[in-house]
Amino acid sequence: MLRFVPSFQRQLRNRLVANSQRALFISCTRPAPLRRPLRSPVPSRRGILTSATTMPRSQNEMKTSLGSFDLLQRIKVDNSEVVISRWQSRESGLTVVHVDYDAPIVKGYFVVPTEIFNDSGCPHTLEHLVFLGSEKYPYKGVLDNLANRAFAAGTNAWTDTDHTAYTIETAGEQGFLQLLPVFVDHILYPTLADSGFVTEVHHINHKGEDAGVVYSEMQGRENTPGDLAALRQQRLFYPSGSAYRSETGGLMEALRKLTIDEIRNYHASYYVPHNLCLIVSGKLSTEALLGTVHREVEPRIKAHNQANGPRPAGWKRPFMETPSIQVAKMPETLKDVVEFPESDESIGELQLSFVGPTVHEHGDHRYLMDKAIDVLGVYLTESAVAPLTKQFVEIESPLCTYISFYESAKASFTTLDVHFGAVPTEELDLLAGKFKSALECIVRDGFDMNRIRLVLKKERLRVSSSLESSGGDYFTNSIINDFLYGDANGQDLGPLVAEFGRLKHLSEWTNQDWVNVLEKFYIKNNPVVIQSKPSAKLQEILEATEKARVQKQREKLGPVGLEKLKKILEDAKTEHDRPIPSEVLTSFPVPDVSTISWIPVDSARNESGKVTSRGRPPNAASTSVEDYLTKDPASVPYFIQFDHVKSHFITVSAYLSTAKVPPQLKPYISAYLSSFFMLPIIRSDGTRVSHEEVVRQLEDDTVSYGISLGYEGYFQELVRCSIKLETSQYSTGIAWLRDLLFCSEYDVERLTVIAAKLQQNLPEMKRDGNTVVGSVYGQLLFDETSTLQASALLAQLDFSPKLSQLLKTDPKRVVQDLQELRSYLTDPSALRFSVAGNVLALEKPRSAWMQYFKELPNVVLEPVPWASQNLSDIGKKPVRQGIVVSLATIESSFALHTTKSISGFGHPEHPALRLACEVLDGAESYLWKFIRGSGLAYGANLSLDSEAGLLSLQLYRCPNSFQAFEEAAKVVKGLADGSVAIEDTTIDAAKSSIAYDIAQSLSTPKKATTSSFVNQVLRDVPQDFGQLFLQQIRGVTKEEVQESIRKYILPLFDASSSVAVVVSAPSKAGEIKDSLTALGYEVEARTLDVRQEDLDAMEVDESGSEIDSDSENGSDSNDGMEPHR
Ligand SMILES: [Zn+2]
């Protein structure tokens, strides 16, 4: 994702997640991940259960031609409701693919293959500029303003190496068809004005510094290990002349030289109707879709003399008819090292790239080979017992903390990448050799064919589960690949999505077949090997070079030149501020919220042996869940909530409270979560099950399982563990829950492995400004009783080395501590269970529990712990405090400004405040325009945390976060005192966006049932809170929004009622600190670095990690990050 988009979940606290294969900290702040998506030639990483049947046209009742469109291909995906049809206009050459299936949300992906032979970033800059207005709608933001009125999420887009995709989602058909012609007008006929280039792509500000939205974005990416390695790989791997060598995002140096005319030329060549594919997934009529395109899009194309059919004279299909078609050739292994700036030099990364199956050699067979390689990757790495994971990760001194296999389709072959994460620096040089030896061992010893069978079974289950949650949207990647690289007449689409045959075919493969694939592609094939090595020196060099460059630029421009640039920027902003005539907006009708269809959840609760109904939708099944449960005679004393929905699966979960866990045990939570599914178990009959057997059986019995703190960043004082299964496996799921909760053995050897992995992941996380800012925020606003705080990055930086040390010197104590922790967590007084999915298909919905949990007593439950109970003194009264952390690994800054807010989800002022936040930070809203639009930040949004009672302004990836903060203050003050007026259309749009957000948050069976539980049990609001909230939002007036801004948001900008946490590149840290001080904040400067204690602990470590202990970046205090205890 290269564009920032706000979502409904207003959250920013860090959460800790452990899953079946890899424990890691996930920062759940909203900005989307910025690494470009790695696509596989098959849909996503997983395969497909279903096969596909090409429908003979004669038997197809549907027309084969509609308006100017001819049907190229129509596929019914077997064992599903999904029908895919591909059409092309004989007039304009436009391609339309309709993926037809039942779903409340309609999604559009508008795809342009974007081949380029340099690093100018034209594809990416164009992606941004398209949103600034079109010929027919020449206003910045008009697209998102209209989208916002039509129950749509603001539009979005991404740019990959080979294409740009523009996306839109709406609740329902009407809004979608309204928006489609407007969006396509933007894509084909954008204004591409000079002023847009200035703010959105690149400019030099009045201080002589480079800025602009795209520029800042790439500034944040270019020197990260991921991007550095990716570019070096591209250069070494693809033959000269190939467009796959290019950085389509734009290198900073190239962006500084890029002109709007180059972008206009690029647009004229590639953004043409015969190079555009409109993919539309969801429930709407194909006739209405093609009719809309024919009536409202094609006349525009004709008016531009672009209706020249599918293949105009002289047109060369990108990638397929250019030098990019060449197959990469590796006569020998190529090794290279890229350095990335990082003061902690202990951990790096390694990437291997191989030439995979080629079209030339494998033809149609290529898809089978791709699938085999995908399965091979799962076999080798997924789960703790997978051969490579077992050998490289699950050991006392891990050689890496994860291994991932990726496939990506190119014009004539598939690229195979293997990525090793968090590799100790001294291993970087050796790991590729060890990888090869390990594979040779497998060739020698043979594959475990039982595990192969298991992996293939798992594939089918996972696909079935994904199809249930995503429907036909699941095929999007395949369809994009088909448009890029498939047969121009759509003949490859059928084979591409037909995976059932492939999986079946693979289940017949012998050991030798698998050995052949492994040997051919990974052993006998020569890779490009890229080591990413941390370098403290490089960091200084980059900083010094950048300073000198800016200084020189400033001098060269001189005061007159700078003044001129200032004027250019101001003029550009003025041009953007040209208001959209309100009739353009009001001509777009706002759909009625009552037209949104919700997934019905029938809910009942078992408590103290009794069953009570907890919410029954009007259109639910004829048997109520309450009646059904009552018919299963069992006196179950404890709390189980049942949420029924139409589904093939059932999920059993336990919610544990950390409220009673003493503070000294809380740091163990990370280890508890990470080890949860990976320890030996002593069953009640005394049998010991080894950890490998536990992992193997879990894989066999379940669809998926996971454990985390809280739910989507909220309620992190709770631990939630869930197991998803086929309905028939219900009681097996309950048995697992019991064994995992009560019977795990804290085996020291296993714990040592897990602790080492946890520790090794930390340096990587420390490189992420967003994770660090979230962690410092947690530390400032929450106290030592907070689990959230104890499990976040900063506390773990402190605790993790201690744990590893303790496991050597006093392992008994660790075991005792963990046992004690478990006894607090599983205390019956705070234990709640959830059963979600197809409850009406369960044989013994209640009595199955008595078989495994009979010992649990009937007790009065403690209330659910809320974050508001763990606030620190500052969290209770956030005033004047400021912290500026200098973080050497980033080039921009991240900030959180926080004030006191309303507490509780049912608070009467909640709807008005939520709407006020949306008015401020929704797509094309005030913050978007004034901050993002002027290149002051990549993202700016408000996070309302009703659980903790705090409100934060989050500034994401800014050249200088203080400038963005100042600008936000100006806007909010203007809105508060009325000098900036709020239009009615702004309020309509914000309400409509919230409607979409809520519909989206309830759009799959899983989301609907989880929401039912979270609302009733955790948030303490009714089951249908989302729908009720929407009704309340409808009634909020403009005056109430203004009042909310004055009362709750304005205090963010006053030092006497707010606190500020900033993480910044060292070059800006001082300036930001001074600016905040001038506003009245008492600012503490810190530097995040490795502390002496950590070093001491690590030196004892037998892994012999070499840590560079100096911190030469002029920090105010070396151990500034010590937790406040
Ligand atoms: Zn971007």
Image (spheres, rainbow, N blue to C red):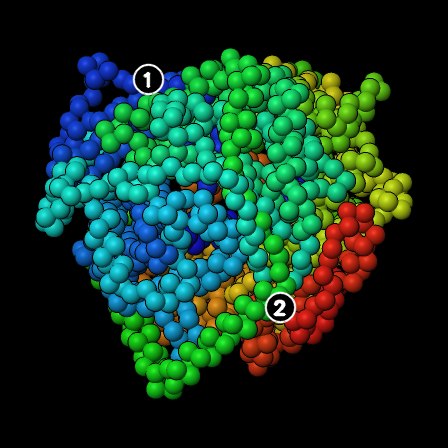
Q: Nearer the viewer, residue 130 or 875?
A: 130
- Callout 2 secondary element: strand
Would you call the spot at circle 2 few (<14 residues within 10 Å), some (14-19), or many (20 or more)? many
The answer for how far apart the CA atoms under marks 1 and 2 are is 58 Å
Single out the residue that lies furthest toward the front.
331
Assess mark 1: CB under 8 A from ligand 1? no
Q: Nearer the viewer, residue 199 or 251?
A: 251
- Callout 1 secondary element: strand
Percent x, y of residue 286:
24, 30
Is residue 954 at all visible to an observer of this figure? yes
Percent x, y of residue 500:
43, 18
Question: Could you tell me which residue is drawn at 18 percent across and 57 percent down?
Answer: 135
**Against 361, is 418 above or below?**
below
Question: Could you tell me which residue is drawn at 32 percent across and 52 percent down?
Answer: 117
Which residue position holds label 1?
A: 53
Asked if residue 675 lies left or right of residue 1081, the reply is right
**Against 364, is 299 above or below?**
below
Q: Nearer the viewer, residue 895 or 647?
A: 895
Question: Could you tell me which residue is drawn at 33 percent across and 74 percent down?
Answer: 569
Of the numbered discs in the image, which one, if any, rests on residue 563? none
Which residue position holds label 2?
A: 886
Percent x, y of residue 1061:
60, 66
Q: Which of the marked residues, 1 or 2, is nearer the chain's N terminus?
A: 1
Quarter of the image holding residue 687?
A: top right
Quarter of the image holding residue 323?
A: top left
Percent x, y of residue 92:
15, 40
Asked if residue 1122 lies left or right of residue 621, the reply is right
Task: Residue type at mark 1: give it.
Answer: Thr
